[in-house]
Image (cartoon, rainbow, N blue to C red):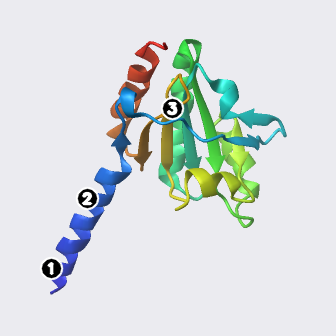
Amino acid sequence: TGVIMKIKVMILSIMFLIVANIAVGAEDRVAACPLEGKDLKGEKVRLADLKGNVVVISFWATWCAPCKKELRFLNELLKTKSKNGFRVIAISIDGPESAADIRTVTKRYRLSMPVIHDKEGAIIAVWNSKATVPFSIFIDRRGRIAYKHVGFSKGYQKELEKRIDDLLAEKVQ
């Protein structure tokens, strides 16, 4: 019975990953909900202001090692792709016990993207209700959700960059 339980858990895990990593065809995409918050400098960040760009919204936490790897990778992509209209919004789901570490992480990795600490959980409630990290949402130039992804691993970097490049290559009508 222990083997059967392990098989059931494995099947459920695979099913979750299949459902969690959803790409949507351009014709079936839906408009992204409004997203607004203040970054660590106190400046307003609004997804609507980034329309016309490809945006990755990255949910992360300071205690999540894969999150920090993804943020570093996205930060590197920003250096080469921002001139083509690529943007990132990083949203920390850290609670009060680790909130002080957010600034430390952003400085250590020299993150050039806006970082929002969603203290009240208003953004998380709408965009990431299960508070999963790392969790990324890819928004196309027209402000529509194109892709969602849970997790980050070394092998995923090429896929992530390809998805961004594909979205950057799409023509806006």
* Image position, residue 28 (x, y; %): 38, 33
User: How many residues crowd around disc 2 within 10 Å: few (fewer than 14), some, or many (20 or more)?
Assistant: few
Q: Are marks 3 and 2 in contact (CB under 8 Å)?
A: no
Real-space CA distance between mark 3 and mark 1, rounded to the nearest whole angstrom: 41 Å
Which amino acid type corresponds to the residue marked 2 in the rendered image?
Ile
Compared to residue 4, the image places residue 118 above or below, namely above
Residue pictured at 15% horizontal, 79% vertical: 4
* Image position, residue 111 (x, y; %): 65, 34
Closer to us: 22 or 71: 22
Q: Seen in the image, is 18 located left or right of residue 48?
A: left
Q: Quadrant of the N terminus?
A: bottom left
User: In the rendered image, which residue does mark 1 sit on?
Assistant: 4
Residue pictured at 60% horizontal, 53% vertical: 126
Residue pictured at 21% horizontal, 80% vertical: 5
Residue pictured at 49% horizontal, 27% vertical: 140
Which amino acid type corresponds to the residue marked 3 in the rendered image?
Arg
User: In the rendered image, which residue does mark 3 sit on?
Assistant: 144
Real-space CA distance between mark 3 and mark 2, rounded to the nearest whole angstrom: 27 Å
Query: Could you tell which of marks 3 and 2 lies nearer the N-terminus?
Result: 2
Q: Is residue 61 visible?
A: no
Query: Could you tell which of marks 3 and 1 lies nearer the N-terminus?
Result: 1
Quadrant in which residue 155 is drawn: top left
User: In the rendered image, which residue does mark 2 sit on?
Assistant: 14
Query: Could you tell which of marks 1 and 2 lies nearer the N-terminus?
Result: 1
SS at mark 3 in the image: loop
User: How many residues crowd around disc 3 within 10 Å: few (fewer than 14), some, or many (20 or more)?
Assistant: many
